[in-house]
Image (spheres, helix red, strand yellow):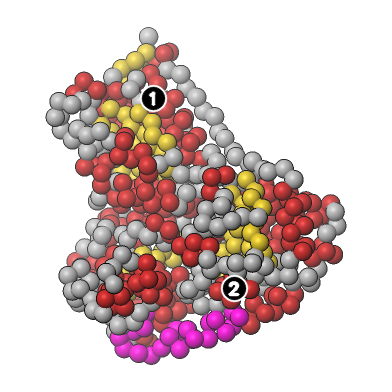
Amino acid sequence: MATVTGGQLAAEALIERNVEYVFTLSGGHITPIYQYLEESEVTLFDTRHEQAATFMAEAWGKLNRKPGIAMVTAGPGFTNALTGVASAFFSNTPMVIIAGCVGLEHKEKLDLQDMDQEPVIRPMVKKTLVCQKTERVSEYFDMAFRYATSGRPGPVYLEIPVDVLNATVERDSVKKLGTLVTSRTIDPGKAAEMLSMMASAKNPVVIAGTGVWQSQAEEELVKFIENTGTPVFTSLSGRGTIADNHPLCFEGALAIRPGGAFAAYLETDLVILLGTRVCLYYMFGDVFNPAAKKIQVDICAEEIGRNTTVDLPVVSDIKALLQDLNRKIDEDDLSATFQDRFSAWIEKLRLADKDGKAPAEADWNSDNEPIHQLRLAREINEFMNRPDDIVVADGGDTTTWMGMTRTMTQAGHYLDYGIYGSLGVGLPYANAAKLRYPDKRVLLITGDGSFGFNFMEVENAIRKNIPLVIVICNDLGWGMIRHSQEIKIGHAIEAGTFIGRINYHQLVEALGGVGMLVEKPEDIRPALEKAFASGKTACINVMADPTTVSPGSMALANVGAYKA
C-alpha cells in the first residue's frame, strides 16, 4: 500500500493549484514541505525577513487577483509575518499564509518556538484553519484557497503542526478536493433602481475602487461610464481600471490629490461607490455633500453603510452588476436618456480639475535645492510613461507625493500600502512586481525611513538578478511625523523623527548594485536613464527638502492623538 507524508500532501496541493512562487523564510517546522517543493515547478522565493515574505505574497495577490502564498516557520517566524497579513486583510487581497508550529505531542512542554498562534492571527484574516490530521492536509488546502478567493478576497491562515507534516498515512485514506468558486453574485432588480436614480440626478460621480479590479470589471466599467456619460474617479487598486486620460475620468479619488475631486464631492447630488469603502480617504463620508444621495455596491453586505447612510445598498459582485447595467441600457435603449445629460457637470469638473491642479504646478516644476518632493514625483511620472511601467510607492509623505502625481493608464501597475498604511512594503512589493512582469520597467520610490524596514531585500534582488530601480526621497528622517508634530505641538521631537544624511546609494553599491546621488532637480532624469540602462538593481539617493509639508502630514496632525 502506497504511503505519503503530510509534507508531501502540502507540496502536492500547491503544485496541483499551479502556484508559481511561495514567498518564505526557511525554518525547521516547515522543512517537511520544503523538501517536496525543492525540485518541483513551484519556486521557493526566500526572503531575508518573514515580513517581506508576506508583503511579497500580498503584492502577488494584488497583481494577479489570485492568492499569493507565504510560508513561515513557528514562533518568531509567525510573529514576524503578521504585519503583511494585516495589510492584506485591509487591502482585501487573496493570500494563503502557511505556518508551521510545534508538534501536537510537544504542545505546552516549552518546546522550541512553541506558542498559541491561531488566536493571535484570527482578527487579521478571513479564516483560520488548523489541520491536526495528516490524512486531511489536502482538504485543508482546498478550504484555504476557497476562503481566500470567494466573496470578498482576503488572507487565510493555514497552520499545520510539524509532526502532522512528518507523519505518514496511506494514500488511499487521503480525500482530495478541488472546488474552484467564481463568485458573481448579484442583487436582482437593483440595476433598474440605480439607473432611475441616475436619470434623476444632475451632478453624479462614480468612485471605482478595488472591487472593480478584483472582479476583473475594467471593460464593463468603461462601457458603463461611456453609456451614461458619468464622471468617474478611481481609488486604490481601482486606479487605472479606467485610464486617467479617458475624457470622463478625473483621476484619483482622494480629495488631497490636485484636481477636481474635492470640488466634485462638495457639489455632487449622487455618489455611486463601486467596490470602495467609505474610510479615511473620504473623511469617513463627511467630504460628500450632505444632501447627496448615495448608492453603494459591495460584495460584502456588512460593508455597506459604514460611516454614512446609503440610499440604495446593492450587494453584488461589481462585474456582474455592471454587466446587468450595460445590458439594461442596451435592451431598453436608454442611451438617449443619458446622452449629454451631464455635459454641463462634466465641463464644470474639467474647470475644477484645472483649477485644482494650478496651485501644485509651481511645485511640480520647482527648481529648488534641496529638491521639492513634487518635482521628484513629476520627473518619475513623466519618465515612467509607458502604459506597462510599474511604479511602487512606500513611505509616509513619499507615498502622498507620488499619489498626488501618478498618472494611471493601466490597472494593476501602481502599488502602495493603501488603507493600512504600513511602511516597509516597497522593496517586497517591487521584487514581486518584477517577478510577475520581468520584461516591464519597475520603479520603487521610497522614503529614507521606510527604506530601512526591509533593506536587505536589496541584497535579495541583486543576488537573484531582479533589476529594480529604487529612488529614495531623502528628507533626513520621518518627515510625515516630524511635520505633523510641528503643526500640532509646535516642534518636532528629535527622537523618532530625525535620521540624518545617510549615503544609501553607497550601501547598495557595496552589495553589488548601482548607486547614484542626486542633489539637483535637473539631474533626476539623467539618473533614471542611467539606472534603467544599467540592467542592475540601482539606487538613486535624492536629497529632498526636509521642510516641505505634505497634505498627508497636515491630515495626520488633525487626527493624531496629541495633547492640546
How many numbered badges does the structure rendering display? 2
User: In which quadrant is the N terminus drawn?
Assistant: top left
Residue 474: mark in rendering: none
| 131 drawn magenta | no
Badge 1: few (under 14), some or many (20 or more) residues near its Cα, within 10 Å?
A: many
Q: Main secondary structure of the magenta part?
A: helix
Say which amino acid is labelled 1. Val
Question: Relative to the observer, which residue lies in front, 234 or 463?
Answer: 234
Q: In terms of secondary structure, where does tag 2 sit?
A: helix
Q: Is residue 33 above or below residue 5?
A: below
Q: Position of residue 490 (x, y in %)?
A: 26, 80
Disc 2: CA contacts within 10 A as few (<14), some (14-19) or many (>=20): some
Q: Which residue is mark 2?
A: 266
Residue 517: quadrant of the picture = bottom left
Q: Whole-percent x and y of residue 33?
A: 31, 31
Compared to 515, does 193 lie above or below?
Answer: above
Residue in view at x 18 percent, y 26 percent? 108
- Going from N to C along the chain, the mark reached first, 2 or 1, is 1
Q: Nearer the viewer, residue 84 or 36?
A: 84
| Residue type (three-letter) at the residue carrying disc 2 | Leu
Of residues 265 and 501, which is closer to you in this image?
Answer: 265
At a point 31% along the width and 34% down the height, the residue shown is 118
* Label ID, residue 137: 1
* Magenta-drawn stretch contains 355: yes
Quick check: can you spot residue 338? yes
Q: Residue at x 38, y 52 (%)?
A: 87
Q: Please state the horizontal and vertical placement of residue 359, each as a whole percent of the image.
A: 49, 86
Q: Is residue 58 visible?
A: no
Q: Where are the magenta residues, as a range?
A: 352-373
**Residue 63 placed where, x, y %?**
48, 53
Q: Quadrant of the C terminus?
A: bottom left
The mark closer to the camera, 2 or 1, is 2
